[in-house]
Amino acid sequence: MKKFFSLCLCLFMACSLSVNAQDKGDFYVGGNLKFGLTAVDMPVLGSETATHFGIAPEVGYFVAYKFKIGLGISYDYASETHQMTFMPNIAYYVPIVKNLYYVPGLAIGGGFITSEGNSEGLFTMSLKLASLEYRPTSKFAFGVSLVNLDYSRYSEINQVDFGILSSPTVSFKYFF
């Protein structure tokens, strides 16, 4: 009986430690970095590969247990194209093992895209399908997003990207 009680106590402590950083009312600051290659196939111009890079600082707040809302400002660069986007987002934390979470998320936003001297408005939406976050401490986390579905619309152009390991995103967060 004493072993059973000790096991229950250890499990309770482990669960309470892993839950600590996503309680209602917790804030975080962080950001992510993105790097990848995009293959563009245009009927008239042929095929082209573009390297893209992105950086996005973010702040967020847990409105409920395991459910966060956030606001990110992202800058992306690819083939002489600059993109600035304001992205409100939501995500839900699903525990896998201690301190490791599956974090699917949705971001919808708008901004500006500049290419060849022309600047236009932009609508964008991103769905994170395979995103993981690891918390080595209760105040710090880092993550990776490996599968994303992205949609962008600007200047009568609809662009859909389904990235499987083609443009991974690495993120970090500090909770307070």
Image (tube, grey):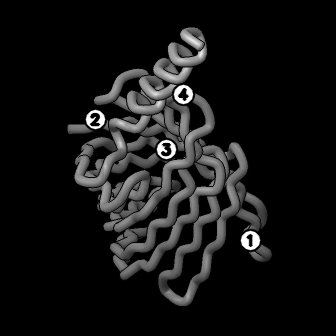
Residue at 53% in and 74% down: 152
Q: Are marks 1 and 3 in contact (CB under 8 Å)?
A: no
- Disc 1 from disc 3: Cα separation: 24 Å
Q: Which residue is mark 2?
A: 174
**Would you identify the image quadrant in which residue 2 lies?**
top right
Would residue 76 be found to the left or right of residue 150 on screen? left
Q: Which residue is mark 4?
A: 98
Which comes before the other along the chain, label 3 or label 4?
Answer: 3
Name which residue type carries label 2.
Tyr
Query: In the rendering, at what x and y percent does residue 160 appear?
Result: 65, 71
Name which residue type carries label 1.
Met
Residue at 43% in and 48% down: 54
Residue at 34% in and 73% down: 112
Identify the image quadrant of the C terminus.
top left
Name which residue type carries label 3.
Lys
Q: Residue furthest top?
A: 3
Depth check, mark 2 against mark 3: the one in front is 2
